[in-house]
Amino acid sequence: MQSDVLYSPAPPMPRTGWQGQLDRFIGPGATPAEVILQLVPSLGAAISAPIYASTLPIDWNPLQLSLIAILGFDLVGGVLTNATAAAKRWYHRSGQGWRQHLTFVSVHLFHIGLVAILFRGADGFFFAGISSYLLLASVLILASPLYLQRPISLGLYGLVLLGDRYLFAPTPGLEWFLPLFFLKLLVSHLLNETPYRQTDRR
């Protein structure tokens, strides 16, 4: 029986070449199991999301279907990748603070813009509302004491689910977008959780 000891080392250095680029994306030192957990469901989402969209009575163009596949891959992969021990060590290592986390979050405003323009007829209310909530919620989580970040993050994510249900009309073919988008950012990425070793057991 392994002792229940939290493990929070500095991450290993990224490798060189293309492997180093992958390390900087998913976190250096990712185990084969972590890589499989990230890759297989992401590929499944990239395939199944446009297939599902194609069953709807909507005249999709190739750009839209391609983007649906990319968003499915990115969001499912992002939820799982950012939750791994390797990613937690990497994205919350020493020197990663407000600026780095808000930069990561802010890049995803592009996702909201694409959905608003290409799937919701240039819906400005959707873009402004979702973007504002994302930035405000991110700041609230980062400004909170570490021991309160998890419940605050989950509470803010709960509001997302309510807003997705009662405030905004669903995006046909992308009904999953907002729940996965905010799960990736508010819960998987921003929470500074202590990673475990591969051998840790309860």
Image (cartoon, grey):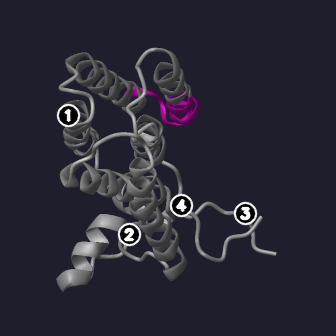
Give the mark nearest the N terminus, 4 or 1: 1
Report the residue marked by disc 3: 4
Residue 152 rendering spot, x and y as whole percentages? 52, 27
Q: Examine the residues drawn in magenta and state their main secondary structure.
A: helix
Give the mark nearest the N terminus, 2 or 4: 2
Left or right? Give the position of 36 relative to 14. right
Q: Which mark is residue 195?
A: 4
Give the mark nearest the N terminus, 1 or 3: 3
For the residues labelled 1 and 2, the Cα–Cα distance comes to 34 Å
The residue closer to the viewer here, 116 or 53, is 53
Q: Are marks 1 and 3 in contact (CB under 8 Å)?
A: no
The residue closer to the viewer here, 106 or 198, is 106
Q: Which mark is residue 11?
A: 2
Give the quadrant of residue 28.
bottom left
Tag 4: amino acid: Pro
Report the residue marked by disc 1: 113
Name the image quarter holding the C terminus.
bottom right
Tag 1: amino acid: Gly
Q: Which residues are magenta?
A: 143-154
For the residues labelled 4 and 3, the Cα–Cα distance comes to 12 Å
